[in-house]
Amino acid sequence: MNNKRILVIGSSNTDMTAKTQELPRPGETVLGGVFTMGAGGKGANQAVAAQRLGGNVQFICKVGQDMFGDNAIEHYKKEGLDTSGILRSLLPSGVALIYVDSHAENCIVVASGANGDFTEADIEASKQAILNCDILLLQLESPIPTVLKAAKMAHEAGATVVLNPAPACALPEEIFRYIDLFIPNETELSTFSGLPVTDKETAEVAAKAMQQKGVGKLIVTMGSKGALICDGGPATFVPAHEVKAVDTTAAGDTFCGALCVAVSEGKSLKEAVEFACAASALTVQKMGAQNSIPFRKDINI
Ligand code: RIB
């Protein structure tokens, strides 16, 4: 483990997943297959990925004063995460209802609960951790004013601010100035840039538009195709590993956690993306979110 500090601020959920042949259409009931319950949430998945892959990670989230919250904190401690900044809410802990079909596609409804109760005052209370970190990793399952405040605070303190803008939602333009590394998928990039993104060429154009808004560098994740690095020079494409996917849940989260670890180790962005692609290729081959996130020893890079 290196001593650069990665701080992840974000959501913690309990994922309830049902397998089904095809995803139901509105109004339709389908008979599914296996049901599993496991640890999830974009923030937690990214923190666990970074920790398992060799990072020095603190995770800050807000969970309820219920059994799910107790179990989550216990689990994060066992993973080796620094949990000293985790907060409790009077609202129930976050839960995600997930369907995964036979093509490994999923659809997810998050009942945010305590995640939605994360406040700007909570960010103020987390100030020391933010000022001490080298890399701050954020997503959008937390209230946007808290994401903005944390990004600004870390940026002003000189940390590298990484934003995975998932799930996509309206963002204040100001936030883009604080983002050193923006990691959207194609749909998210299209939403934030207002431009169509259908291939590498259109992704590069949209990435440039984001850089005009103030974003530093971008890595556009393109699912089973790979990822595109847009760092101001000519874009570099890193192809994905060819694997048989069974569940893509947490693949993007693994990618982001892995990428931060590699960056914290001083790897180039291309090497970091290669490492992140290798990690997420392992995640899609297993069911579940944190259940499928690999360890450093599993990656041959
Ligand atoms: O990115 C996957 C995650 O999204 C799941 O673990 C679920 O909890 C939702 O937050």
Image: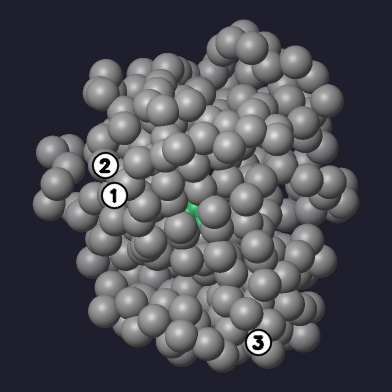
- Is 301 situated left or right of 53 in this image? left
Q: Secondary structure at mark 2?
A: loop
Q: Which mark is residue 142?
A: none
Q: Position of residue 183 (x, y in %)?
A: 57, 40
Mark 1 or mark 2, which has the lower sequence index?
2
Residue, disc 1 = 292
Q: Secondary structure at mark 1?
A: helix
| Three-letter amino acid code of the residue under disc 3 | Ser
Q: Is residue 61 above or below residue 47?
A: below
Mark 3 or mark 1, which has the lower sequence index?
3
Q: Is residue 176 above or below residue 78?
A: above
Q: Position of residue 61 (x, y in %)?
A: 56, 75
Q: CA distance from mark 3 to mark 1?
A: 28 Å
Residue, disc 3 = 89
Q: Which image quadrant: the C terminus? A: top left
Q: Position of residue 9 (x, y in %)?
A: 57, 68
Q: Are marks 1 and 2 in contact (CB under 8 Å)?
A: yes
Instruction: Name which residue lies at 38% across and 61% down.
Output: 37
Q: Is residue 223 visible?
A: yes
The part of the image, by quadrant, that contains residue 131 is: bottom right
Pick the front one: 106 or 116: 106
Residue, disc 2 = 286
The part of the image, by quadrant, that contains residue 276 is: top left
